[in-house]
Amino acid sequence: MISIKRKTLGDVIMDVVVYVLLTVLAVVMVIPFIYVIAASFADETYMAKTPMFLFPAQTSFNAYITMFSGKVGEQVIRSLIISVCITLVGTLVNLFFTTTMAYGLSRSNLIGKKAILNLVLFTMVFGGGMIPTFLLVRSLGMYNSYASLIIPGAISAYNMLIIRNFFMDLPAGLEEAASIDGCTDIGIFVKIALPLSLPALATFGLFYAVGHWNGYMTALLYLTDSKKYPFQLVLKNLISQTGLAETTAGDQDPPEETLKMAIIVVGTVPILCVYPFLQKHFAAGVMVGAIKG
Amino acid sequence: MAKKDKAQETSLAKKNKWVQIKRDKWMYLLLLPGVLYFIIFKIIPLWGIFISMKDFYAGVPFMKAPWVGLENFTRFFSSYGFVRLLTNTLIISLMNIILYFPLPIILALLLNEIRVQWYKKVLQTLVYVPHFVSMVVIASITLMLLKQPASETSAGGAIYEITKALTGTGETWMESKVAIYFVLLVQVIWKETGWGTIIFLAALAGVDVEQYEAAIVDGATRFQQLIYITIPAIMTTVVTMFILRMGSVLDTGFEQIILMQNDVNRSATETFDTYVYNIGRVDGNYGYSTAVGLFKSVVSLICIQAANRLAKRAGQAGLF
């Protein structure tokens, strides 16, 4: 053991630089959140006249009251419900498709495994593109339906391969013992493999869920009925409404700045609530060594 | 005799194979949904190769659309749009590689120097969070910060007001063909720098502690340890990540750019991804748009293969 712990002047300077720099960086990362929250509580008429930098000079809860009332409120609440449902159903579908395939590919001596793996790897580097996929989804009758937001993205090849790695690392003895006891492969999958990989499932479940909650592109591509819009699309449409565009649309006033910020807060909070519980799993194993043989 | 043996052997092997497949029947059942998914949603869209060779518009049945051979491609290459798309894509992508790519590495090295574990955890939590914020929310916040005042008496966004105070003239960020690139860059930096550290922190965690102990015995300062042990130890990871990033040089991210695009900055922000959407989905010119998308896919494939080769040559496992 090295018992002498001398700190040279250089070491001290380095410590100071590192801590100061990182603290400043972390603050910079967080400022936008504070700004949005602050703006959502600001008084609209005051804010329109004086620039707000970090904290509002006059506060009001009006934005939150308007958000859940009237025409805007109707839109926002409906889209939030839609997004919650899509996120729940979509994540379950994702996990079902991803884990079954990952487990199927985790058996080393399965005939045809190599061919399937090559198929997956090929689709990771080459695809038909946006329009052919769009035409396919439309001809499958999913156009303008919620299925279009869930089914075409059922498996992320990358996630599937990482989960497969988890399954491959499970002790082989357990599976053997179970199969001797008369367990079928499906039984082993459900009773042994899945429970043992719960941390991985939670992590990838979160990734998929965030993808659904934040999803904008698929809804933009496949949904035409504005009553079906999920949250992100409604938010985008409210944000891009300017006073000018609204004069032609009629009675609805353009959403106020504070209202937009309040909607952002409501739409971002759910993710930030789940996130800390799963953060400990974001460690090395999840991200590295994804694709092997 | 020998012939007979061989025939028997192969029939036995076939039988064995059949027995094996039968034994694994439940595994194949598990694989079925996934394989069907990949065939339907990843392989079937490859018929886009045929779409790209047709003069195919929205509202016309596919069968009735006339074949035009490679005309969509030649029209695209000879158009002014091609050069513009390529330049825009490369500018956005190269700015990202030069100005964003080093940041997660630096941040990971800094985090690695923090010895107080709970503080390190707190910092990590804070810098990971933006990764989970949706692109729509980021675009909304950006637009609010950069907002130009609607009239003389009203106020603009915070960053607009700050630049106005500093330079005297308010920078029209969203309408400047240069400034918009920096807006896009800052968005990426804010969203992904923290998350990007994970892979480098994993590499740093793998560095042998004994090396540091030996260095301390030899009287190395912390800074010397950083230069002579830590940085060389993650160099291979850095090189691999760099090569792989170069491989996806044509990918600029669809959502971010389509959200920040407006009629004024379009000539600077139109990239392959957004062009395919604007021409295909918005204008309904399926044939031409598919050709553009296909061109991008092929070039990307070549880039990824080349990058993968290079990664292997650099002593890395590569992607495949």
Image: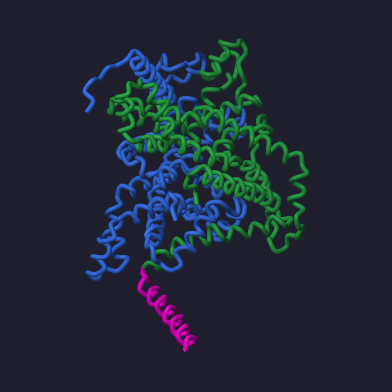
Chain colours: A blue, B green
Looking at this view, name the residue that lies furthest to the front.
B218
Q: Position of residue A97 (x, y in %)?
A: 41, 57
Q: Position of residue A183 (x, y in %)?
A: 26, 68
**Which image quarter is the N terminus of chain A in?**
top left
Q: Position of residue B21 (x, y in %)?
A: 40, 73
Does residue B233 lie above or below A120 as drawn? above
Residue drawn at x 52%, y 36% as measured from the top left: A236
Q: Quadrant of residue A270?
A: top left
Q: Position of residue B160 (x, y in %)?
A: 56, 18
Q: Quadrant of residue A274?
A: top left
Residue A182: in magenta span: no
In the image, B239 versus B114, the foreground residue is B239
Does residue A143 lie above or below A53 as drawn? below
Q: Is residue A152 left or right of residue A57?
A: right
Q: Main secondary structure of the magenta part?
A: helix
Residue B15: in magenta span: yes
Does residue A223 lie above or below A231 as drawn? below
Q: Is residue B253 visible?
A: yes
Residue drawn at x 42%, y 81% as measured from the top left: B12
Residue extent of the magenta highlight: B1-26
